[in-house]
Amino acid sequence: MPDYAPAQNLGDIPAWTQVPPPSQPGPQPGDDTPQEHAPMEMIIAPDFSNLEAQLDNVDLLHMSTVAQVPYLPSSKDQAQNVMKLLEGRRGRLADLGAGDGRLVFAASSVGFQCTGFEINSVLVAYARSKAYWRGIPSSQAVFVKKDLWKTDLCSYNNVTAFLAPGVMEVLGEKLLKELPQDALVISCRFPFPNWPQKSTVGSGLDQTFAYEISSVRSHLRNPPKTEMK
């Protein structure tokens, strides 16, 4: 493979790779005719190829930043699966990593008093604007820009979370310390390690998992004994 030296100026770049002004026809490959160069911008995309490994090593207090837990909106099927697992439940609901608010809006429409926690200020503003234009009162749905790791969740008896696999273990520890005994936790796509599931709905990327905090605490206090062979 030939070696390529970095271009020192626009004149070093082959004419056919450059973007012409709209008024001029673009140069074609093999055309070495001098062209009047248009300004060029460099756009560098972030590399998320090793995201999960990075998540395992970051400071726990900053795990919920956008760079570490990228915004992945819930699909329609995933939102429906969450609502199936919430059937028969009432009370206050915390949505961790609320994004654009679609889970909050779905839950508030059936009577939950919802708080969407989101650290991305752009998404918080977008969700608030949607709530405003839909005429949803703050008693049903509110969105707050807070770091969930620094927020006490003891007043919520329902929690939904769609975060990232690298944070599920430490999130589980936080929820076990803070949630009331009758709380239900629903995780989208990524299950909590070592937690016994109450039920699950869906499959693949849309799979959701439900956990009763009372059962999880009991299981972890009295883990099943393995038979000795």
Image (spheres, rainbow, N blue to C red):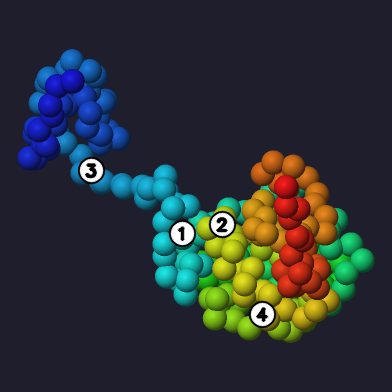
- Element at label 1: helix
Report crowding for label 4: few under 14, some 14 to 19, many 20 or more residues within 10 A (C-alpha): few
Q: In percent of the image, x 17 and y 17: which residue is there?
A: 31
Report crowding for label 1: few under 14, some 14 to 19, many 20 or more residues within 10 A (C-alpha): many
Q: Is residue 138 left or right of residue 53?
A: right
The percent coordinates of residue 6 (x first, y second) are 12, 37
Q: Earlier in the sequence, mark 3 or mark 1?
A: 3
Given contact means CB atoms under 8 Å apart, are the residues at marks 2 and 1 in contact?
A: yes
Q: In percent of the image, x 66 and y 63: which residue is there?
A: 161
- Element at label 3: loop
Q: Which residue is mark 4?
A: 177
Q: Nearer the viewer, mark 4 or mark 3?
A: 4
Return the residue nearer the eye: 72 or 199.
199
User: How far separated are the C-alphas under marks 2 and 4?
Assistant: 20 Å
Report crowding for label 3: few under 14, some 14 to 19, many 20 or more residues within 10 A (C-alpha): few
The image's mark for residue 40 is 3
For residue 85, above or below residue 77:
below
Q: Earlier in the sequence, mark 4 or mark 3?
A: 3
Q: Is residue 64 left or right of residue 77?
A: left
Q: Earlier in the sequence, mark 2 or mark 4?
A: 2
The kind of residue on which mark 1 rests is: Leu
Return the residue nearer the eye: 219 or 146.
219
Q: Earlier in the sequence, mark 2 or mark 3?
A: 3
Q: Based on the displayed image, in which of its 4 quarters is residue 223 positioned? A: bottom right
User: How far separated are the C-alphas under marks 2 and 1?
Assistant: 8 Å
Return the residue nearer the eye: 74 or 9.
74
Given contact means CB atoms under 8 Å apart, are the residues at marks 2 and 4 in contact?
A: no
The image's mark for residue 164 is 2
User: How far separated are the C-alphas under marks 3 and 1?
Assistant: 34 Å
The kind of residue on which mark 4 rests is: Lys
